[in-house]
Image (spheres, helix red, strand yellow):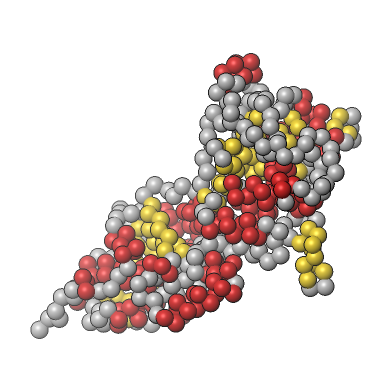
Amino acid sequence: MSAPALDTRSIDFPEKMQFLFQPAKFKVAYGGRAGLKSWSFARALLILGLSGKERILCARELQKSIDESVHKLLADQISLMGMNYLYDVQQAHILGRGSAEGTSFSFEGLRHNVTKIKSYEGITRCWVEEAAKFSKNSFNVLEPTIFRVPNSEIWLSFNPEQDEDFVYIHFVLHRPPPGAIVVKTTWRDNQWLTPEILESIRHLRETDYDEYLHVYEGHTKQVLEGAIFADELRSAVAENRITSVAYERGVPVSVAFDLGYADMTCMWFWQKVGFNLHVINYYQNRLKHIDHYLEKMQSMGYLYTGVWLPHDAKMKTPGTRMSIEEQVRALYPRITHIVPKLSVQDRINAGRTIFPKCYFDAERTIEGIKGLRGYRYELRDGKFSRNPDHEGSDCADAFTYMGIASAQRTGAIDCKLDLPRSVTERGLRGALSGVFDNARDVLLGEQRSTNRWLGR
């Protein structure tokens, strides 16, 4: 007598993860702990495997033994869903039987098995667990291997770790590739949370909010202890202001510099759109002369309305007999400005003032956001002082100059040098009236700190 057919409609499955049953080239689920990502992937693959036609590769970037794979997770889900008579759980494989005969699950590490991975044939679905560690090299090997089979799929599940991780950039910060479904899931999407887990979530939120954002809300690690802009960065994350921000054509761009040579030269690019500041780009480099950064500005193709330089740009540079201000002004004669000289604390307050209005493009300003997180108070005898640490200050200094510059009122615009300036100015001067902020809380020129930056 044959076993009765399994009614998959009676199996618990979260609504947020129903997309796993839709056809898609890439299926990506990311987020925080208790979001049911791995649990759902295992259940979905076992249900799909009942067709008897699936050859499933379960992979991790690093896997030294079968104990480090999702083998046990799948075995547990087989028991919980009453599928023991449909799957044969072996030491290194899981094979379908009965109506699921023909389906198989294999388990591999990617980084040290490139040749073996290339030799795999007929994979219909590949699940990469803990994909935050998935390297670009492994992806470049895996993608053509899996997609040799028509309608095959790559599934990725992960909790974000670092902003610079390949998978996070490729599928979350970038526009996802064609044929991808990307879903974020957190504990809020889990209807089966126990009171004990809810209490753990509440406790972490109250005692270590930064860790809570990483562990349960699925944000990358912030590492904000001692960070000068810690509160502002937390708010930007919570309000989703580190996101995808498009360049608004026709709206002029301003750029603020912090100058260095052995230290970093840093540049923030922003547009004023309504009452907000769209921070659309960031660039940094070292051991380069000013002409390198001017060429970088030109290559971006923006229409510029202000180039803001720190006070030390007035100093003559060896070998040119010209100051950096003079070199920049030669290319941008009407829009080059020196930021008023303020105290460090007033500059920090200027940065804090604009932070709530800033929307950062997550992809193009990734290095700048890292720099702001790393701008910290000095650590002395195990305690943070009131003085900023100079190390890592270049990016933040440029941001504070942006804060000061955004309060200045200018009317000039400029553009790429390969466009006729007279034509550009004739066509845009009228259209741009009213674009600039009317705030003028900082007097132009040098001034000593009065500890009254924008009322603070």
Location of residue 339 by image quarter: top right
In this rendering, would 1 be left or right of 19?
left
Which image quarter is the N terminus in? bottom left
On the image, the x and y values in percent for residue 322 come to 86, 29
Image point (66%, 26%), residue name: 411
Q: Position of residue 293 (x, y in %)?
A: 72, 36
Q: Residue at x 56, y 73 (%)?
A: 206
Report which quarter residue 2 is drawn in: bottom left
Question: Which is more toward the observer, 273 or 46?
Answer: 273
Q: Is residue 170 visible?
A: yes
Q: Position of residue 122 (x, y in %)?
A: 32, 61
Residue positioned 49% across, 65% down in the render: 217
**Left or right: where 189 falls relative to 313:** left
Please state if 4 lies on the left or on the right of 278 as rendered.
left
Up/down of 264 relative to 390, above or below: above
Frontmost residue, 99 versus 305: 305
Q: Do we see residue 105 in this rendering? A: no
